[in-house]
Image (cartoon, helix red, strand yellow):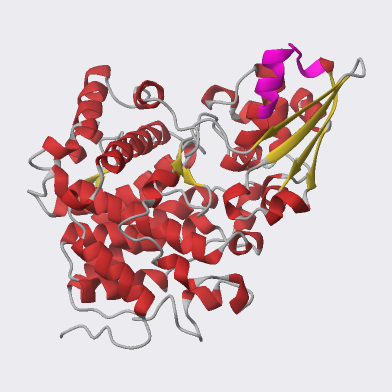
Amino acid sequence: MAHDASGDNRYTRGIAGFVSKLTYADIPPEVIARIKLLMLDALGCALYGADLEWSRMLQRTLSEVDTTRTCPVWGTDLRLSAPHAALVNGTQVQGFELDDVHRAGVLHVGAVVLPALIAVAQMRPGMSGQEFLAAGVAGYEIGPRVGLCMGPEHIAQGWHSGATLGVFSAAAGAARGLGLDASQTVHALGIAGTQAAGLMAAQYGAMVKRMHAGRSSQSGLYGALFARAGFTGIVNVLESEYGGFCTTFSRSTDRFRLDELTAGLGSVWQTMGVALKFYACVGSNHTTLDAIRDMQAERAFGAEDVARIVVHGSRVTMDHVGWRYVPQGLTSAQLNLPYCVATWLLDGDCFVDQFTEDKVADPQRMRVAEKVSVRHDDEITAKGAQYRHMVRVELWLTDGTRLERTVESARGSEHRFASDADVIEKFEKLAEKALPRARVTELRDAVLGLERLPDASVLNSLLAR
């Protein structure tokens, strides 16, 4: 049956047209260079995440109900069906708060795009590295635009944007990877969009928060596969006044801006807006940690020298990470700003070794966390989504000294992007938790040389243990 993409869906059609027609030659060299680093970072996060408790639970449970052995679960010797592999691999990428974030679009992009796209590469042998990169860019471009359309209100009202927005990135990347035409891609987006879900209450300790990205990637993959088969979706999934994504996931029609969905497609590259993390905690915490790090560079001090800290931030920062810390598991620790500040002050770092189960209710960390308060700053919120992580940090030492630092963007952000060497170092440190060093080197070289690969499906074999 032929797909009918008629109706009031000019934004969905605009996205689908861009995705289906995008070629490697259309993409500026700096975007190609950037997305390879972003992909490398995401795969390192996934490999580290392979042995986390919640990842192992999914691996074990799905291997019991899924007898298909097609696609590898990265960093393991397990193979599952493509949709289940996407579910687990996406969970692993987002499994320890180490992965990328498009701050303005409020989306962890690699965690939703790559599990679906690499599964497609496995199902479509012979996809060249250049084709893979074009599909990857298609995915990285779309989800953030939906986030820009929805604005910070989307996450402020309780939706986990990394899950809800992610289906569009995953569907776009998978649709381009499968070579769907514009009409089929409309349906892929419409099938994926109706599966969008994810509640922010998961941040207070539930393992399911880790699974949101994987479920989103799986939904996007389903969207592309079903659309290829002729299955139809909501053709105006973004525009529909009743039951469309934007109207349903926003409190009122003046809270979203449909023109952001296609603004600058092909000339403004949202891939360049994706930031990387160098702390193992939610992105909203990074600017505060950088502020304290900068203060300490000027004057050395530790936890016992601090009397109190006040963090002034956006409404999103206040709601997302500014709550009083209560130990409810690693998820709550990694998402809570006072806890992460306490961890930095006590340990001088906030990377993987600092977040272990025995530290979640550590009395010393909890005592120091009580010194930290987070307050809403109307002026920062008024600056818009691009500045949602901006903070002004006031810190008083026990001797009465007052220090202050304002940080607009964190290390590794789109404004202060990391060096190639820093990204590679982080990747190798994480990947070596799951793979032998020689394999890590081979995978690194394959990703950084993707445009020269004759068959992108080699990534699957390199990611398997």
Q: Place residue 253 in its image quadrant.
A: bottom right
> Can residue 182 be seen by looking at this rendering?
yes
For the residue pair 103 and 248, the one nearer the viewer reads as 103
> Can residue 64 be seen by looking at this rendering?
no
Please, is residue 247 above or below residue 15 in the view? below
Please, is residue 113 above or below residue 255 in the view? above
Q: Place residue 266 in its image quadrant.
A: bottom left
**Is 337 on the left-hand or right-hand side of 108?**
right
Quarter of the image where the C terminus is located: top left
In the image, the segment drawn in magenta is 291-304
Q: Main secondary structure of the magenta part?
A: helix
**Is 405 on the left-hand or right-hand side of 114?**
right
Q: Position of residue 446 (x, y in %)?
A: 19, 31
Q: Is residue 297 magenta?
A: yes
Number of numbered discs visible in the structure rendering: 0
Q: Residue at x 61, y 75 (%)?
A: 254
Please, is residue 192 above or below residue 447 in the view? below
Q: Position of residue 97 (x, y in %)?
A: 52, 39
Q: Position of residue 217 (x, y in %)?
A: 36, 56
Judged from this view, the residue extending furthest toward the right is 400
Q: Residue at x 44, y 60 (%)?
A: 145
Quarter of the image where the N terminus is located: bottom left
Q: Residue at x 43, y 75 (%)?
A: 238
**Is 191 on the left-hand or right-hand side of 289?**
left
Q: Position of residue 32 (x, y in %)?
A: 26, 41
For the residue pair 109 and 145, the one nearer the viewer reads as 145
